[in-house]
Amino acid sequence: MSSIHHIITLFKKDVLLEIRQQYSFYGILLYIGATVLVLQTAISEPETKVWNGLFWVIQLFICINAVAKSFLQESKGRMLYFYSIASPTDFVLAKLLFNSLLMLVMSVISVALFILFLGNPVEKVWSFIGLVLLGGWSLSLVFTFLAAIAAKAQQNAAIMAVLGFPLIIPQLLLLMRLSNAAFNPILTIPVNTILLLMALDIMVILLAVILFPFLWKD
């Protein structure tokens, strides 16, 4: 129970910080809105594959801006304080939980703006929304894990780029393959691919729980 209490407390702390620092949240919203507006001006209603590809590319950049800062914004003094009151497992799980919630909100907003400004070529809307939520959660887990590693390195951006590429490309390919079926009424969404994506998510969570305590000691 103590561990759950620590996770909830740390999660609430991140929520309160996000509410106080509203410029960060609204800055991401501005990025989403401006990007979609530029796309609408440039290509109006894109083809199905272009719509799908653009959506996931923008999701990737949204995740980098929204999630990757989670560990980088923590000062050394604050990290030392957290070290004295909570375990590394509780801390990283709280970060994963908060960033997952933040990315789910951003994903829903992205879908709404894409459909509003670029049309709605999706045949299976609810299936696509489910995939978007699953994809947003997957991306948030990966970049939270990478941010935890990069925060302990001097070359933060370089570390995230080097480590992120082999981790994020397979997930993006799986997500695009899954979402393609939502645009075609004939195709069915492969359950095996969904299970594979969920297995990758669980693996990332386990890696974060296992490896973060070693980073925490530094």
Image (spheres, grey):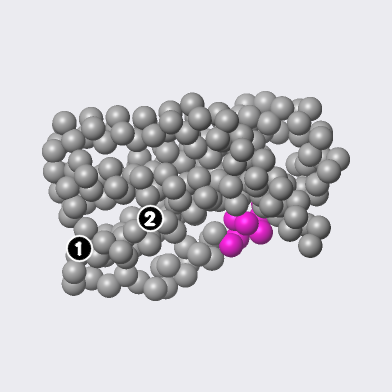
Q: Quadrant of the N terminus?
A: bottom right
Magenta segment includes 205: yes
Please indicate whether residue 7 sits to the left or right of residue 189 in the image: right
Q: Residue at x 45, y 50 (%)?
A: 104
Q: Residue at x 56, y 35 (%)?
A: 18
Q: Please, what is the three-letter code of the amino acid marked with disc 2?
A: Val
Residue 179 location, x and y as percent? Answer: 31, 59
Dot 2 or dot 1, earlier in sequence: 1
Q: Is residue 29 above or below residue 123?
A: above
Magenta segment includes 21: no
Please indicate whether residue 201 sits to the left or right of residue 77 in the image: left
Please indicate whether residue 84 sits to the left or right of residue 9 in the image: right
Q: Are marks 2 and 1 in contact (CB under 8 Å)?
A: no
The answer to whether one can see residue 3 in this image is: yes
Q: Which residues are magenta?
A: 202-208
Residue 68 location, x and y as percent? Answer: 55, 37
**Residue 110, disc:** none
Residue 211 location, x and y as percent? Answer: 72, 50
Secondary structure that dominates the magenta span? helix
Q: Quadrant of the C terminus?
A: top right
What residue would you read off at disc 2? 132
Q: CA separation, marks 2 and 1? A: 14 Å
Q: Secondary structure at mark 2?
A: helix
Answer with the quarter of the image where residue 206 lies. Answer: bottom right
Nearest the viewer among 179 and 37 is 37
Q: Residue at x 38, y 55 (%)?
A: 132
Q: Is residue 8 above or below residue 29?
A: below
